[in-house]
């Protein structure tokens, strides 16, 4: 039978076509399973299912590798800018100098003079969650740009992409200023992409000095590391909403909402909270590991393990190698960093965690760098969203251009009550 796959159900048989990948797992096309055999699959959390093939990024969980459009993350991090990496995801190849210059200029035109944002933010209480505010702001963009928010014309999609790449960081920067108690300032058109966001988010005033290039480079690196990660929760949410014909604005807002959860984008905040708890209890790492292994104890070892990786998260390796050096260069000592390193060493040496292949992930170290750059903890997930935005946009474009695409509509195995009659229950 070779590589053929077949399902036998009673006296009926169905051949399942194999979909060959360029890397990684092969796929079985089960689209005829219900019509031919009258059964469907149950796959909790879609751990074994792919709704569609994708060419955006590849995660090899067993070997601990990540690549964007074929480039290993180690090849890109620190060697290309975030905007160049965004172009790569969107258009499949790294840009030429004229292409990236034009891209930067087009985005820059949308990033300045956005007075509606100040009025928009005033409608939210100061205590509003930044991610909720960001998602609402993206939905507001659909109302501001009705001329192409519902259009699938290629030129309209490309303009919407540039608007989102410009306006989401600008809105995020103004949200950050509110958190810090700073008044709004205008985004600088003369600054490159990441520098413009950095300045708008953290400058004391319009006349403040330009951002430190070393600090901008650190933020650029972090954003590249977060730019895409396969069909994760938020990227799948973008594709799911978009599959119903929703606009690119609504789909990105769905991605932001999905990312806001503590099991997805909020994990780096939880890591710092965990480390602060360990520190407040005397820094006893052995006690912390014992508690983490006790299922009756609510304490969890945050930043370890990953749904996909069964090896080191390659992004965590890059950040760990960078964190100490960056903090030292910036003159910002973080006492929790050494505690984090000691906790990692102890956990990796512990048979319980080693057996379960629980290695540090990207969230374990990223919070240290965000905090060192001056961002409050409440902004960490928003920064993640800015980084993931090009990935979401790439997945939406891939979904929207798929000639075989269908609206996402999972089947259901119903396990509720059978038919009831009101007369029998009275």
Image (cartoon, rainbow, N blue to C red):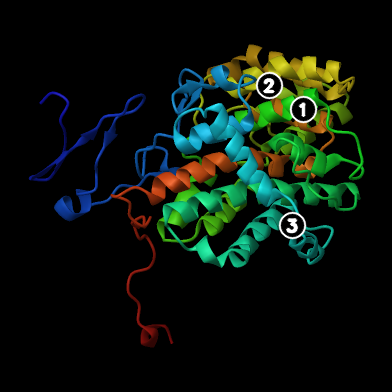
Instruction: Give percent across and percent down for residue 422.
Output: 39, 85
> In the image, what residue occupies the spot 82% across and 57% down?
127
Mark 3, Cα crowd under 10 Å, few <14 / some 14-19 / many 20+, is some
Up the image or down, 426 lies above or below 11; here it is below
- Of labels 1 and 2, earlier in sequence is 2
The residue that mark 2 highlights is: 319
Q: Residues within 10 Å of mark 2 (few under 14, many from 20)?
A: many
Question: Which residue is found at the position 88% from the left and 30% from the top?
Answer: 280
Point out residue 1 in the picture as x, y percentages from the top left corner: 10, 26
Label 1, secondary structure: give it: helix
**Is residue 94 visible from the viewing direction of this image?**
yes
Q: Residue at x 79, y 51 (%)?
A: 175
Give the residue pinned by disc 1. 369
Mark 3 or mark 1, whichever is nearer to me: 3
Q: Is residue 417 left or right of residue 19?
A: right
Pick whichever of labels 2 and 3 is earlier in the sequence: 3
């Amino acid at each position: 039978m070779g590589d053929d796959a077949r399902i036998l159900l009673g006296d009926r048989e169905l051949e399942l076509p194999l979909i060959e990948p360029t890397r990684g797992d092969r796929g079985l096309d089960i689209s005829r399973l219900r019509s031919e055999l009258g059964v469907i699959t149950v796959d909790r959390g879609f751990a074994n299912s792919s709704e569609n093939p994708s060419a955006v990024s590849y995660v090899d969980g067993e070997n601990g590798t990540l690549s964007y459009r074929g480039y290993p993350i180690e090849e890109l991090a620190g060697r290309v800018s975030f905007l160049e990496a965004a172009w790569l995801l969107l258009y499949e190849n790294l840009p030429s100098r004229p292409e990236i210059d034009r891209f930067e200029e087009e985005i820059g035109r949308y990033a300045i003079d956005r007075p509606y944002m100040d009025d928009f933010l005033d409608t939210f209480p100061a205590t509003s969650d930044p991610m909720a505010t960001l998602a609402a702001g993206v939905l507001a963009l659909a109302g501001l740009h009705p001329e192409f928010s519902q259009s699938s014309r290629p030129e309209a999609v490309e303009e919407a992409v540039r608007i989102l790449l410009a306006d989401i960081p600008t809105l995020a920067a103004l949200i950050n200023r509110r958190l810090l108690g700073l008044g709004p300032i205008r985004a600088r058109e003369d600054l490159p992409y990441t520098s413009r966001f950095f300045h708008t988010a953290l400058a004391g005033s319009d006349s403040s000095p330009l951002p430190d290039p070393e600090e901008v480079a650190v933020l650029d690196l972090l954003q590249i590391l977060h730019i895409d990660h396969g069909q994760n929760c938020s990227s799948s949410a973008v594709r799911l909403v978009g599959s119903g014909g929703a606009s690119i604005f609504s789909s990105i807002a769905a991605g932001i909402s999905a990312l806001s959860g503590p099991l997805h984008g909020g994990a780096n905040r939880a890591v710092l909270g965990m480390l602060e708890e360990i520190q407040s209890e005397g820094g006893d790492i052995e006690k912390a590991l014992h508690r983490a292994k006790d299922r009756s104890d609510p304490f969890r070892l945050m930043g370890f393990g990953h749904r996909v990786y069964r090896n080191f998260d390659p992004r965590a390796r890059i950040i760990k190698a960078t964190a100490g050096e960056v903090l030292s260069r910036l003159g910002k000592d973080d006492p929790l960093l050494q505690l984090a390193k000691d906790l990692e060493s102890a956990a990796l040496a512990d048979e319980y965690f080693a057996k379960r292949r629980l290695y540090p992930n990207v969230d374990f170290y990223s919070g240290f760098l965000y905090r060192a750059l001056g961002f409050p903890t409440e902004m960490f997930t928003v920064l993640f969203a800015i980084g993931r935005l090009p990935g979401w946009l790439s997945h939406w474009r891939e979904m929207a251009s798929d000639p075989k695409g269908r609206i996402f509509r999972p089947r259901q195995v119903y396990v509720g009550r059978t038919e009831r009659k009101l007369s029998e229950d009275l």
